[in-house]
Amino acid sequence: MLPNNLIRSTLKTTDEPSLQKEDSELTKDSKGFKGHDMLAPFTAGWQTTQLHPLVIEKSEGSYVYDVNGKKYLDSLAGLWCTALGGNEPRLVAAATAQLNQLPFYHSFFNFTTKPSLDLAKELIETFTARKMGKVFFTNSGSEANDTQVKLVWYYNNALGRPNKKKFIARTQSFHGSTFLSASLTGIPAVHQQFDLPAPFVLYTDCPHYWRYHLPGETEEEFSTRLANNLETLIMKEGPDTIAAFIAEPVIGAGGVIPPPATYFDKIQAVLKKYDILFVADEVITAFGRLGTMFGCDKYNIKPDLVSLAKALSSAYLPIGAVMISPEISEVIYSQSNKLGSFNHGFTHSGHPVSCAVAIEALKIYKERNIVDRVKSISLRFQDGIKSFSDSPIIGEIRGTGLILCTEFADNKSPNEPFPPQWGIGIYFGEECKKHGMLVRASYDHIAMCPPLIITPDEVDDLISIYGKALKATEERVKELKSQQKKQ
C-alpha cells in the first residue's frame, strides 16, 4: 500500500502530460468522472477529486475497455478473480436462466434453494486435499475469513475451551477488510486509523526467502527457522490460548510470495503438536491459479477450514464460501442443537443466482481441464517474465502458475530498496497502461495474475508490454539517480 503523497508525486512526475490530455479528451466527450459520488475502496480522496478514474465499460476475454474505447490486456484478472475472462457466455446464460426462474430466496430457518445445495455438494466433491464436511456461503473472501473466526470461537466454546481464541497470521498476508478479516491481515496500512488489529491476532514471520533468509541459509533451513519461531510464539502465549493459524498457500496481495521448500510441512507439524486449527485462505489460489485445483493440493496442506471466493464464480457475481471439516461441523451441529439455532448468516448467503454461476464455473474448469491448461501456459508466462531478471532495477521475480510479482531493488538487494518517493512500481504500472496493459502496482513491486483463459499470443503480448515498460522504468531510474548525484 503506497502512501498518498508518494502516489501523487509519482503520477505528477511520470504522467502529467498524458493526464492533462486525458482531462481534455474526457471533458470534450462528457465522459469525465472527476469528483464522482462514490467513496472508492483503497483509493485516496485526492485521487477522486483531482483525477479521472479509469472507468471500465466492457470486457472481452483477457481484455477490458474503458469508456473511451481504449483496450487493455487485464493482467490482474480484475482483482485476481476473473479466471474465465470477461465474457464467458455460459456464465451469463446461467445467471440469466436463474434470474428468470428464481432471482432470490434465502437460506435461513431451514429454507434454501436448489443451486445452493448443489454448489455445496459440488465443492465438497471437488476439494480432495482432505475430506470436508459442510459448506457455509458468504458474499466475499473478507466475509469468509470473518466467518472463520466466529466458527473457530464457536467450536472452542462448544468444547469448553473458552480461552483458546487467539489466531496466528503472518506479516504481509492479506485476509480481507472487515473488522475481523482486516485484523488477520498482516499489512499495517490496512490497520491505520481503524483501531486495528484486534488483540486476538498474533503475527508470525512472512516466509519470503529472498528478503529474510540469513547468509548461507537454504530454503529448507529457512523454513525450519520459521517453524521454530512459530513454536516459540505458541509457547510464549500458551498453547491453550491459540485457536488457529491462517495462511494463504501463496501470499497474494502482500506481494505474491510462494512458500519456501518444506515450509508448510514444517508449519503443519507444529500446529498438529499443539492442537491448533489450520485455516487455508484459498481466495486467490483456488480453482487452477497455481496449476492445481487448489493451493492445498500443490503444497500438501491438510486444512481444517478453507476460505473461497473470487474465481468461485469467476467474479461474475459476488460469492464466497467456507469449507468446514467433519470434526468441526459435527461440533457446530451439536452446539446449535443445544442453543436452538446456529445464529450466523447473511441475507445473501447461498444466493441462488451467484450459486448457479459458480456451479457453471466449476463445470467449465473441469470440462476444459483448466488445471492442465494452466500448467502448460504458465511455463511461457513465468519463463517469459523471468527472462528480464538480469535487469539492474529488478531485485526478484517470483511466482508460480499464473501469478507473479516483480520486486524492484537497487543492486538486486532486498536491503537496498529504491527511495519510496521515486514510486518505481507506480511508474512501471503507468508505462504498462500507456501500452495497453493493466497491472497491480505498488511503490516497490508490481503483480500480475492474468485470466486462466489467456492465450499463448496474449502471453507474448503481455511479455512484450512488460519489456517496454521495464525499459522505460530503467531509464527513469537512471534519470533519478543522476538528479540525486547533483543534489
Image (cartoon, rainbow, N blue to C red):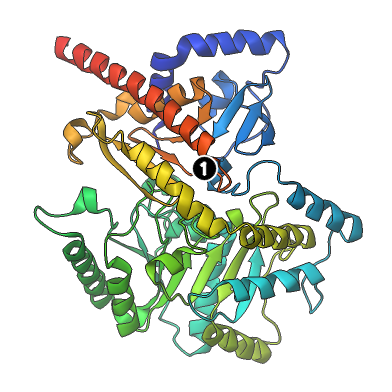
Decide if residue 122 is on the left or right side of residue 261: right
Taking the spot 54% from the left edge, 65% from the top edge, the residue there is 307
**Most distant residue in the right direction:** 100
Decide if residue 437 is on the left or right side of residue 471: right
Relative height, residue 358 to residue 384 (above, below): below
Q: Amino acid at mark 1?
A: Pro
Image quadrant holding the N terminus, namely top left
Q: Position of residue 97 (x, y in %)?
A: 86, 55
Taking the spot 38% from the left edge, 15% from the top edge, the residue there is 13
Q: Quadrant of residue 166?
A: bottom left
Q: Position of residue 57 (x, y in %)?
A: 70, 30
Q: Position of residue 236 (x, y in %)?
A: 23, 74
- In this figure, which residue is indicated by the disc labeled 1? 450
Q: Closer to the camera, 85 or 444? A: 85
Q: Position of residue 254 (x, y in %)?
A: 39, 48
Q: Closer to the camera, 166 or 248? A: 248
Decide if residue 340 is on the left or right side of residue 223: right
Image quadrant holding the C terminus, namely top left
Decide if residue 156 is on the left or right side of residue 474: right
| Mark 1 nearby-residue class (10 Å; few <14, some 14–19, many ≥20) | many
Taking the spot 50% from the left edge, 52% from the top edge, the residue there is 374
